[in-house]
Image (tube, grey):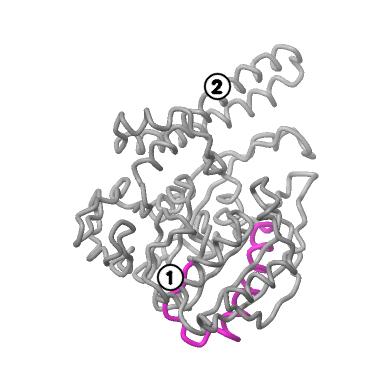
Amino acid sequence: MNEALKDTICLQCGNKLGNYQNFSNKIICSNCAYEYPVIEQKIPILLKNPHKYLAEILSEYEKYIQESENRLQEIVVSDNKNPLRSQVIKSIESGIIFNNQYIQLLREQISKHIELNHLMKIATHEKSYGYSANFSYLQRDWCWLPEGEEELELIQNTLLKYILSFDTERDAAIVLGAGTGRIAWDLRDKYKWMYATDLSYTMAALFYDLLEKEIVFYEINQKNIFNDTEAARCLTATMYPPKKEVVQIQQPSSENFSYFIGDALHLPFVEHSLSTVISVYFTDVVPPQFLFAEIARVIKLNGIFIHFGPLAYHFNDLSYSLAANEIRALLKQHNFEILAEETVPTFHKSSSVSMSSKLYRNWTFAAIWSGFS
């Protein structure tokens, strides 16, 4: 695991980081000696300012835990108002408390790497890294529920179609906004090296924990459910499909797979070193003007960029919230040519116990990079 990180570069000096040692608590640049933390000796933080990031993540967890405590107090008040719903309300309370134990564990992991001066600098930070305490992607990706597998099958079939049709080299690929890692993990056998990256520490931690054990958590449903027994549904996430017998399962190979905390706008790779860049539900997370410039920097000549998802945009600046036709023009400016495109509808992170579901008409395309003009 993470052997391919030897080919990543230092974001301070631009030189290769050098050999990555498993079970080390840091990666040290062989040129400038800058230190990148490796949390719990397994989760690399490859960012320009990893210590500031960790302090901000700790602040996010602290904020969430406080808000959760306030929510639990509101739940107690609700319980007192309607004794007939006491059992349902108590199940929601217990589920939230159970899930919070995992978030508190992550907070403890992060706090070991924080210095006081970094905490003081971010005391009033407003940046949010999102999904700090969200288990919805864990539910979709690794609980092997029919609704989750249906969405993943549509995504993966589309990606595979583009990969097999247009991606002739299949050397090194990266999945941006990899979340809990299922899509990148399932595609790893199609490439010599597969990288996954995300800016959410929670997502990365969930993936690394799944490599070692099952994760039990609760799906909390406070409304839109058919049965009150599903208000707090206990789920188990595992890397192994349930139809396989445990005695027959071997530890999945991870030799060509690397997952690191990273910024998609500042990737730790030399210019033109990746044959494929894959973005699933991520192109609208950061301004595409900056994202495409970074992809053009790291992708090889005739490399393939694959996009799958809507353009919902997770920010409010309208100057960056481009329509599909504007995206096409922007791709052309960065010397990308769209080879194929289509619309693929999916129910996103659907739950069988819920009355509501979000339907995306996902715009998908594969584009080839022809080099700088």
Q: Which residue is mark 2?
A: 69
Q: Position of residue 73 (x, y in %)?
A: 61, 17
Q: Position of residue 301 (x, y in %)?
A: 48, 83
- Side of 163 where 7 appears, left or right: left
Q: Measure how far apart labels 2 and 1 are at the Cα level.
A: 40 Å
Label drawn at residue 194? 1
Residue plotted at (61% across, 78% down): 367
Q: Residues within 10 Å of mark 1 (few under 14, many from 20)?
A: many
Q: Is residue 149 inside the magenta stretch? A: yes
Q: Earlier in the sequence, mark 2 or mark 1?
A: 2
Indicate whether 104 appears above or below 163: above
Q: Position of residue 228 (x, y in %)?
A: 74, 33
Indicate whether 276 appears above or below 289: below
- The foreground one among 68 and 234 is 68
Query: Magenta region: which residues?
Result: 146-174
- The foreground one among 342 and 241 is 342
Say which amino acid is labelled 2: Glu
Q: Position of residue 146 (x, y in %)?
A: 67, 58
Q: Residues within 10 Å of mark 2 (few under 14, many from 20)?
A: some
**For the view shown, which residue lies furthest in the top direction?**
80
Residue plotted at (57% across, 84% down): 164
Q: Is residue 155 inside the magenta stretch? A: yes
Which element is circle 2 on? helix
Say which amino acid is labelled 1: Met
